[in-house]
Amino acid sequence: MPRFILRFRGNGPAQEADVNRIRALPEARVIDASSPRMMLVEAPEEHLRNAINDMPGWVMSPEQTIQLPDPRQKVLHPPEDTES
C-alpha cells in the first residue's frame, strides 16, 4: 500500500479533529505522527485525497525513497603480479 506525507501548512499545530479524521479513514495506518504538523500515513490515495480536500491547510505528497550511494572505494583493476 502506498505511503503519503501529510503536512499541515496552517498556523500552529494541526487540528486534533483533522488528525483523528485521518486516523479513522478506512484501511489507513499512521506510520509516524511524532511531529505536530506532519504525518506519514499508509492508505489508499483516493481516501486520503478526499479527506484532505475537506480539510483546509493540509497538503499531501507521496513518500519518496532515495538510494544512497555506496561510499566504499572500489578496485578498478587487480594489482599486477610482481612475483615473476
Image: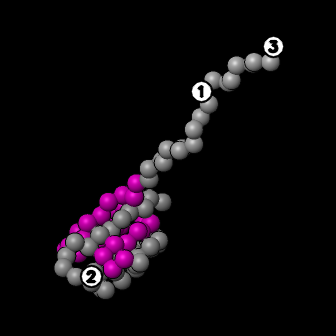
Q: Position of residue 70 (x, y in %)?
A: 54, 44
**Is disc 1 surrounded by few (<14), some (14 to 19) or many (20+) residues within 10 Å?**
few
Which amino acid is tagged 3?
Ser
Q: Position of residue 69 (x, y in %)?
A: 49, 44
**Which residue corresponds to the image point at 70% horizontal and 19% vertical from the top-left?**
80
**Is disc 3 surrounded by few (<14), some (14 to 19) or many (20+) residues within 10 Å?**
few
Structural distance between the alpha carbons of marks 3 and 1:
22 Å
**Which residue corresponds to the image point at 36% horizontal and 58% vertical from the top-left?**
62
Structural distance between the alpha carbons of marks 1 and 2:
53 Å
Q: Position of residue 67 (x, y in %)?
A: 48, 47
**Which residue corresponds to the image point at 48% horizontal and 48% vertical from the top-left?**
68
Quarter occupied by residue 26:
bottom left
Structural distance between the alpha carbons of marks 2 and 3:
73 Å
Q: Position of residue 39 (x, y in %)?
A: 37, 72
Q: Give the residue at mark 2.
A: 13
**Which residue corresponds to the image point at 29% horizontal and 69% vertical from the top-left?**
7
> Looking at the picture, does residue 18 appear above or below residue 73?
below
Q: Are marks 3 and 1 in contact (CB under 8 Å)?
A: no
In primary-sequence order, the first of circles 1 and 2 is 2
Q: Secondary structure at mark 1?
A: loop
Q: Give the residue at mark 1.
A: 76
> Looking at the picture, does residue 62 appear above or below residue 71?
below
Which amino acid is tagged 2?
Pro
**Which tag is nearer the camera, tag 1 or tag 2?**
1
The span shown in magenta is: 35-64
Q: Give the residue at mark 3.
A: 84
> Which residue is outermost to the right?
84
